[in-house]
Amino acid sequence: MSHLNYRHLHYFWVVAKEGGLARAADRLGMAVQTVSAQVKSLEQALGHQLFKPSGRKLVLTEAGQAAFTRAEEIFQIGQRIPEEVHQAATAETLRLSVGLSDGISKLAAHALLEPVLEANSLKLVCHEGEVEHLLSELALHHLDLVLTCQPAPPNPNLRLTSSRIADSAVDWWGPANMVRPFHQNNFPACLNELPVLLPTRHAVLRASVERWFEQQGLRPRIVGEFEDSALMAVFASRGLGVFPLSRLGGGKADGGLMGQLSLLGHSEDLREEVYAIRSRRSQHHPLVQRVLASAGVGSTETTAEAE
């Protein structure tokens, strides 16, 4: 089938709404013959008759009704375009593009970005990916900020600055019926008796957790691995197992997803770090500065410039 001619579709749509060629031609300011020819061209392109006569009027065939339904959607949207373009052109939008590394806790990332969420006319764009790719996008100014579990590696070509903006203890959570029998006085030994969910192996936290298991003499039964901490929390809330979560991302079990989970225990010596990485240009972005200021990054904060 040939490509749809939207001019022909528009003429068909007007004829259908007006109920006849004469009224449609009057509305369009065109000759009846011209409008009729355009509709016939559309019928030929689609391979089906769209109108049939009914007295002095034209009514839609079954095929015509299907075409009209879609045309109505298309041209109603089209009628909104001028207003939306005007609003977009005149609004003072403050855009922040953030890269989140695969291994970072997404609940922790949300907590760190919370200071910018009330900014007027905010447009927040979040990308997830491998650290190397995100840092390349940052160096090309496609991103304003990257949040990751490790500082940027030294690279004189990227000219990036890293600051640690979080160093949080890790707690263990699980569904209430699974956590309740153990209480916190049997932690962490109870992890040997419970099904455990962990981040996948590319996450920095996973390696820290495994070292911590070894230090504690634990050999838990791992029943699930997840790249996304929020997804891990969802499966935990459905009874799959208990899981570790940065206190930054899950310390306030005051509603929402975390409100469906119970605290199993604290592991103060197990930590998750988060670094904010920015380019020389993006470090002046007002929302990047707000994130850093909220995390206490200032003149006393140790930063490492990879250049």
Image: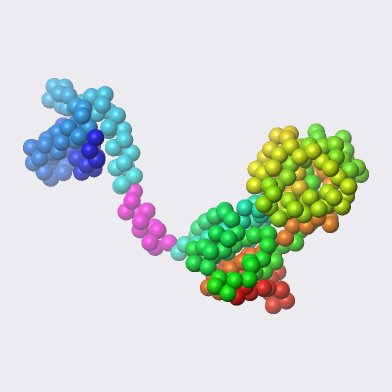
Q: Residue at coordinates 68% horizontally, 47% vertically from top-left?
A: 200
Q: Quadrant of residue 204?
A: bottom right
- Is 140 drawn above or below residue 31 in the view shown? below
- Residue 81 as seen in the image, left or right of residue 97: left
Q: How many labels were placed on the picture? A: 0
Whether residue 305 is visible, yes or no, is: yes
- Residue 88 as seen in the image, left or right of residue 155: left
Furthest residue in direction right, as rendered = 185
Horizontal and vertical percent position of residue 148? 65, 60
Q: Quadrant of residue 66?
A: top left
| Quadrant containing the N terminus in the rendered view | top left
- Residue 143 as seen in the image, left or right of residue 197: left
Furthest residue in direction top, as rendered = 55
Q: Coloured how?
A: rainbow
Horizontal and vertical percent position of residue 275? 67, 64
Verify whether residue 43 appears in magenta. Answer: no
Q: Residue at coordinates 23% horizontally, 43% vertically from top-left?
A: 6
Whether residue 10 is visible, yes or no, is: no
The magenta-colored residue range is: 80-91
- Is 148 drawn above or below residue 307 in the view shown? above
Horizontal and vertical percent position of residue 5? 22, 42
